[in-house]
Image (spheres, helix red, strand yellow):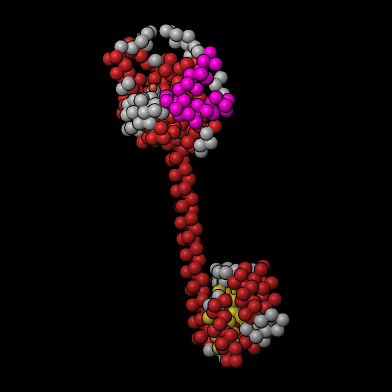
Amino acid sequence: MNNKEKILIIDDEMAPRESIRMVLKDRYAVSTATGALEGLQYISQEPVDLVVMDIKMPKMDGITALQEIKKSYPDTEVVLLTAYASLETARDAIRFGAFDYLLKPFDRNDILQVVEKGLARRRSNTVLKQERDILMDRASYLERQVSEARSNIMMCYEGTVKALILTIDAKDSYTHSHSNRVAILSSSIAASLGVPQQTIKETRYAASIHDIGKIGIDENILKKNGRLTDDEYTEMRNHPAIGVRIVQSVPFLEDAIPVILYHHERYDGKGYPEGIQGEKIPKSARIVNVADAIDAMMSARPYRGALVMSNVMSELRDNAGTQFDPDIVDIILKGRVSLI
Ligand SMILES: [Fe+2]
C-alpha cells in the first residue's frame, strides 16, 4: 500500500531487527538495514518517515548515523534502540534530534506507542511546513501586489505631472517650455552637487511644475510686454502660494511644495513670499532659483533679447551670495553644468 508511512529499521543484530519489523509491518511500510551505512544509503534513495535504529553498531554507531540523518533529512524522525548500559547515551541523543528511545528488551505496545507518537510529530511538522509554505506564497503574492500598486502610483504621479504641465501650456506656452528647460538644468545642477538619485528625480519633477501657480494669475499680467505695475507685481508674487494650493491635495506631489513655494526666495533673505535666507531655503528651491534665472536670462522675450553667455556668467557672479546660493553659482562658473 503506497499510502502507508515508511519506516526503516537499522540494526546489525537480526533478532531485534526482525521482532520490531513483525510488530510494525502490518501498519506501516517497513524496510530494514543491517548497518548504519547501508541504512543511510537506503534513505538517500528512498526517503522514509521514521527510522528505528540501534545505538551500538560496528563501523558507524547510531549516534553518528542520527546526526547524519538529521543533517540531510531534518524532518525524518529517529527512535533509538538501547540496552541499559547505553541508556545515558540514548537520553543525550535527544539533543541531537532523536525523537525518543526504546530500552531493550522491547515491549510490543511500547514499540507501537513510540513509533506512532514519532509519526504524529512528523505529520504535524508536515502540516506546519505546508502552512508555512502557504503563508510564504501569500507573502510573496502580497509583495507582488504592493510593488504593482507602487508602480501604478508612479504612473499616476507621472500622469498628474504631465497633466499639470499641459495645464500650464494651455495658459502660457512660454512658461511651459521655460519650465521644461528649468527642469533639465535643475536636475543637472542637483547631479553636480552629488545629491541622491531620488532627490535629482524629485527636483526635476518639482522644477517642471515650479510655476504651476501662474495658472491663477491674470493672463494679461502673464503675457504683458513691459514692466509690471506695483499692483500687477503684487499679484504675480502670489503664484508660489497659488501653486502650493494646487498641489497640496495631491499627496505624492508633496515633495514639490518647497520648490513651488520658495523658488523666488533670495539667498540674502530679500525674496518672496517669506523672506527666508541662506540654508533655510530648501536646497531644491535654491537650485531651481538659479536654473530659473539662467533660463530667463538666456531666453529672448518680447521686451528684450537673450543675454550672451558671458553676460549670464557675470550676472551670476555679481549676484552670488545675494540673489543666488554661492555654492551653486560656483559649480556653474566652474563649467560643471552644461548650460546649452
Ligand atoms: Fe516663478
Examine the rendering and report whether any part of residue 77 can be seen. yes
- Marks counted in the figure total 0
Seen as rendered, the residue at the extreme right is: 59
Measured from the top left, where is residue 103 in percent x and y? Answer: 55, 88
Q: Quadrant of the C terminus?
A: top right
Residue 46 pos. (x, y %) = 64, 68
**Whether residue 262 is visible:** no
Rendering coords of residue 41 (x, y %): 69, 72
Q: Position of residue 210 (x, y in %)?
A: 40, 25
Instruction: Assess whether residue 10 is covered by the magenta stretch.
Output: no
Kindly indicate the quadrant of the structure image that contains residue 39: bottom right
Main secondary structure along the magenta-highlighted residues: helix
Frontmost residue, 39 versus 196? 196
Q: Depth check: give the residue in front, 88 or 164.
A: 164
- At x 46%, y 38%, the residue is 151
Q: Which residues are magenta?
A: 308-337
Residue ID at (62%, 84%): 55
